[in-house]
Amino acid sequence: MKKTILAILLSFLLISNLNASSKEELLLNKNQPSEIKDCFETLNRATFTFNKALDGLIFKPAAKVYKTFPSPVRNGISNSLDNLSNLVTIPNNIIQGDLNKAGKNSGRFLINTTVGILGLIDVAKHVGLQNYEKEDYGQSLAVLGVGPGCYLVLPVLGPSTVRDSAASLINIAGGDAWYNVTVKNDTHYFNDFDYYSSMVTSGINFRAKNYDSIDSLEKNSIDFYASVKSLYLQDRQQKILNTNKVVDTQDDSSWEEIDN
Amino acid sequence: MNIKKILLITLLYLISFVNAYSQETDIFVQSLIDKTSKILSDNISKEQKITELKVVAKETVDIKGVSLYTLGSFVKTLDQSQQDKYNTLFENYFLKSFSSRLVDYKNPEIIITSKEVINESYTIVNSSLKGTSDRPEIKIDWRIYTKNPDKPLIRDLIIEGLSLARTQKEEFESVLNSNNGDINALFKILEEYSKN
């Protein structure tokens, strides 16, 4: 009897592993940067040029000023923005079936919003709730098997895909609690300004964190548009797979080709 | 000697061989990091730093391998003289790009954290660039080509999971696609980059 149970259990584990492996493989292949077509390249390049000009006029100078703020101030702002992003991450943890992470992130949000003074201090990481990873509706759709569609460059917001752009509409259709309490509903505590200023600050925070890398990339690229597209799609693939292991996302076939 | 003993000796030999083999890649990357850090912290001119960084890159990077990778299957459509021209232009481009990306870093602190032998040709060495008040900690992985164990060579740098070689390959592909696959357009851009 014991043997039968053990055999059933082993078969079950084996099947689950096979399924997991093929699901991951499917996710990897579907979101492989080289497989994502640039169907709107002319329009994308025009939008990219517009975004670059906007960056030079607004985001880069603002990031330069932001970088002069003392490190604790910048960390506080960054922590606070990360804390707000939990409001999108948690429902997406649930959609992706990752209840463990949903629980951890809810804990992080509660602790950091209260003890951490509206998220300014990341207290949660000191009580064992570290390694926060943002999730969004685009990643959830990808996990549910929706392909990325074509590559898309959005005005102001930057690189995306058709799937991810469509998924971001869920945020304004009730999927983002921060949007709901600021823009969608009149709560008397928050208003539209709070939402849009958090979005702009998030953009400046990102630009400041990557200030030198973006400048160096632009200076050393022979096709800056193509470099940004490649880096964005690689990053996206990594986030969808939720992996930090290089061997999970790197395609070795092109390397093998040159060795043969 | 019974079969168990033979198996044990074979196993121990294999384990020690694998350890020695992966340790070499660690030492190789660590020595490269030390050399680069010394150049960057030396009290010499920017031009001198660039010259020395180029020497280090020539010694430690498989520039020919990277050049073939970045052109992908397109390389097969080139005749010998085009391939030679491409290799020369790519080397100049790569050395300039590599040195100018690095030269502005001041005393970067990189710590090797682990390694993973993928197969006999490749080992991934994992490291981390210590964060400063200006930037967070950055994860850097090194793809080391180990086909010749006596002379390991770098083939790719993967920064926070983003492969520089892959980005380069997709950039070149884009240039070729925008110019109907005309290799001369890529040659011209590489020449111009190296001259400026």
Image (cartoon, rainbow, N blue to C red):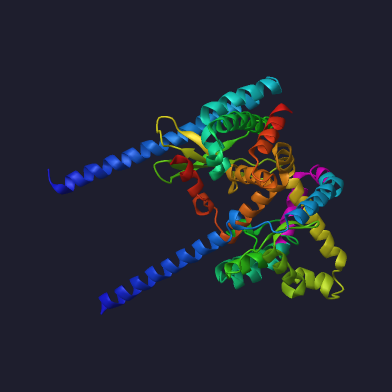
Farthest residue in the bottom direction? Answer: A1
Residue displayed at 27% across by 77% down: A4
Q: Quadrant of residue B109?
A: top right
Q: Is residue B156 above or below residue B195?
A: below
Q: Quadrant of the C terminus of chain A?
A: top left
Please indicate, yes or no, whether residue A64 appears anywhere in the rendered image. yes
Residue displayed at 30% across by 77% down: A5
Farthest residue in the left direction? Answer: B1
Q: Position of residue B3 (x, y in %)?
A: 15, 48
Q: Which residues are magenta?
A: A63-83
User: In the drawing, does residue A72 fall left or right of residue A242?
Assistant: right
Q: Position of residue A97 (x, y in %)?
A: 56, 72
Residue displayed at 50% across by 34% down: B29
Q: Quadrant of the N terminus of chain A?
A: bottom left
Q: Position of residue B35 (x, y in %)?
A: 56, 26
- Judge by depth and name the residue closer to the eye, A151 or B177: B177
Q: Position of residue A178 (x, y in %)?
A: 77, 68
Q: Is residue A62 above or below residue A90?
A: above
Please indicate, yes or no, whether residue A107 appears anywhere in the rendered image. no
- Judge by depth and name the residue closer to the eye, A149 or B38: A149
Q: Main secondary structure of the magenta part?
A: helix
Q: How many labels, in total?
A: 0
Q: Quadrant of residue B91?
A: top right
**Residue A185 magenta-drawn?**
no
Q: Is residue A148 above or below residue A9?
A: above
**Residue A64 magenta-drawn?**
yes
